[in-house]
């Protein structure tokens, strides 16, 4: 419920089928309706992915769990299969979310979840068995094009959600494999573990040019930048500030000083 002194809400976590100690990974607020969209997974097992939508009741100050969905596994038909990661919501209330462990995109619309079939699914696959992350952060442009970061491959993938046509964006200049993505004023901000790369495109993201980068390296502290959000914007629609969250992957995977995932920074 909402705390009138601190103005925050605590959401009861939805646990996908078979999930244990789930982690909320993606979170977006649909400002026109007050809905909160969240992705939930058993992060340590890269499995049991799900999605939940909450209704914020302004008159009572509570958040009501309105809809829940489990990712389906195309391999064995079971539910809750996949690492549900980032989520975005269109102006029409359609949600798109990434499955990082299986390299997939899902769409939630009109009370149903379905996988988005793309022309080349390998573009979203993870390529390194020691780093099983494929499709990760995603954004949508004004033209309705999906842009997805493939963390393992170090690429930015362009997807037409209507046709499923997919391709790697050809990037001129410095870039990197992103975790989170941000989008504003026809520019993409790729958040990697140590750097934010800023890209722009003049051809609806068939190609892109790098405008430079921002150093956010905290690896000396064992922390990796994961995702972020814009702060205030200037009169041109560009961010004045970017807020970044960090995670201690060494803690999470047991090779750091603390094996308890609850200590993530």
Image (cartoon, rainbow, N blue to C red):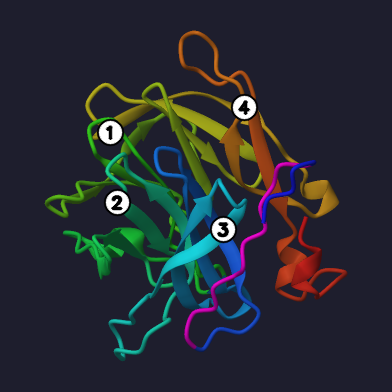
Mark 4 or mark 2, earlier in chain: 2
The reply to whether dot 2 and dot 1 touch (C-beta < 8 Å) is no
Q: Quadrant of the N terminus?
A: bottom right
Q: Quadrant of the C terminus?
A: bottom right
The Cα atoms of the two marked residues, 4 and 2, are separated by 24 Å
Mark 2 or mark 1, earlier in chain: 2
Give the magenta-colored segment's residue range. 6-17
Which residue lies at the image location 34% right of the left edge and 55% below the top edge?
96
The Cα atoms of the two marked residues, 2 and 1, are separated by 21 Å
Residue 94's tag is 2
Q: Residue under circle 1?
A: 205
What is the secondary structure assignment of the residue under circle 1? loop
The reply to whether dot 3 and dot 1 touch (C-beta < 8 Å) is no
Mark 3 or mark 2, earlier in chain: 3
The reply to whether dot 4 and dot 3 touch (C-beta < 8 Å) is no
Disc 4 crowd rating (10 Å Cα; few below 14, some 14-19, many 20+) is: few
Along the line of sight, the residue nearer the viewer: 110 or 134 = 110
Residue 63's tag is 3
Which residue lies at the image location 36% right of the left edge and 24% below the top edge?
186
Q: Nearer the viewer, mark 4 or mark 2?
A: 2
Which residue lies at the image location 53% right of the left edge and 76% below the top edge?
46
Q: Is residue 51 left or right of residue 27?
A: left
What is the secondary structure assignment of the residue under circle 3? strand
Q: Nearer the viewer, mark 2 or mark 1?
A: 2
The Cα atoms of the two marked residues, 3 and 1, are separated by 37 Å
Disc 2 crowd rating (10 Å Cα; few below 14, some 14-19, many 20+) is: few
Along the line of sight, the residue nearer the viewer: 59 or 113 = 59
Disc 1 crowd rating (10 Å Cα; few below 14, some 14-19, many 20+) is: many
Q: Residue under circle 4?
A: 231
């Amino acid at each position: 419920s909402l705390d009138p002194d601190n103005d925050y809400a605590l959401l009861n976590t939805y646990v996908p089928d078979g999930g244990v100690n789930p982690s909320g990974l993606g979170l977006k607020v649909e400002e026109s309706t007050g809905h909160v969209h969240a992705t939930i997974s058993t992060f340590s097992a890269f499995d049991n992915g799900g999605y939940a939508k909450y209704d914020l009741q302004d008159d009572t100050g509570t958040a009501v769990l309105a809809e829940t969905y489990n990712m389906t596994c195309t391999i064995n038909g079971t539910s809750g299969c996949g690492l549900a990661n980032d989520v975005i919501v269109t102006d029409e209330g359609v949600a798109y979310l990434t499955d990082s462990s299986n390299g997939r995109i899902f769409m939630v619309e009109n009370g149903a979840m379905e996988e988005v079939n793309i022309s080349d699914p390998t573009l979203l696959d993870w390529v390194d068995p020691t780093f099983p992350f494929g499709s990760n952060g995603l954004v949508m442009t004004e033209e309705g094009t999906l842009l997805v970061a493939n963390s393992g491959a170090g690429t930015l993938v362009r997807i037409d959600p209507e046709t499923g046509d997919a391709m790697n964006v050809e990037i001129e200049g410095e870039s990197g494999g992103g975790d989170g993505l941000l989008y504003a004023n026809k520019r993409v901000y790729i958040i990697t573990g140590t750097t934010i790369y800023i890209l722009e495109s003049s051809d609806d993201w068939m190609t892109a040019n790098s405008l430079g980068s921002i150093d956010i390296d905290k690896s000396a502290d064992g922390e990796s930048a994961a995702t972020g959000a814009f702060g205030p914007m200037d009169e041109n629609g560009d961010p004045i500030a970017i807020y970044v969250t960090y995670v201690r992957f060494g803690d999470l995977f047991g090779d750091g000083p603390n094996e308890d995932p609850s200590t993530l920074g």
